[in-house]
Amino acid sequence: MIGKRMPKRLDGAPVARQVAQLAAYIDGGTGGAERGDILAQGQLHLIADTRSGQVAEMIASAMGAPRARSSIEHIVLSWRAGEQPALPQIEQALAILLEETGLRGHQVIWTLHLGRADLARRIGCGQADSSRLFP
């Protein structure tokens, strides 16, 4: 498995647009890159059942934390061609990643894609710790 933290946006776009565009990109709908078949999607620390509701929650949380360095983080975990970890193994990899990067407890949306050459999990992680936002 290889993990990569993607560069942060520096264009000064509004928080709501950054979160919405990253969510659309993670889900494979924008950016011009072909992501392959979606094998699974999920979330952590969000209440909403629908993806649009989850994005709205992340936007609200990001706007409620104006001093956060960046409103959202984009991380990619990928596996080499031929490696097919089971979903519980992939979820464990995400838990380890969040723990090691100090993002445990933060809101997360993720999508698992099967590309032409590899298996990749794209992760959008809110920078505001959801447990500290609301008393």
Image (spheres, rainbow, N blue to C red):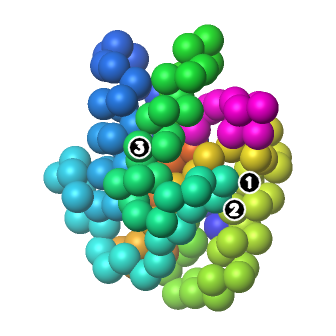
Q: Which residues are magenta?
A: 126-135
Q: Nearer the viewer, mark 3 or mark 2?
A: 3
- Which residue is identified by label 2? 94
Instruction: Confirm whether residue 101 shows in the render.
Output: no
Task: Report the Cα–Cα distance between label 2 and label 1.
Answer: 5 Å
Question: Which residue is depicted at the point 53% across and 87% down?
Answer: 82
Residue 63 sits above or below residue 95 on the image? above
Q: Which quadrant would the C terminus be assigned to in this image?
A: top right
Task: Report the Cα–Cα distance between label 3 and label 1.
Answer: 24 Å
Task: Report the Cα–Cα distance between label 3 and label 2.
Answer: 22 Å
Name the amino acid type tagged 1: Leu
Tag 2 and tag 1, C-beta contact below 8 Å: yes
Helix, strand or loop at disc 2? helix
Q: Is residue 3 left or right of residue 48?
A: right
Q: Which quadrant would the N terminus be assigned to in this image?
A: bottom right
Tag 3 and tag 2, C-beta contact below 8 Å: no
Q: Name the quadrant containing residue 46.
A: bottom right
Mark 3 burial class by Cα count in 10 Å: few <14, some 14-19, many 20+: some
- Which residue is identified by label 3? 56
Q: Which of 66/98 is in front?
A: 66
Name the amino acid type tagged 2: Leu
Question: Which residue is depicted at the point 31% across and 19% down?
Answer: 13
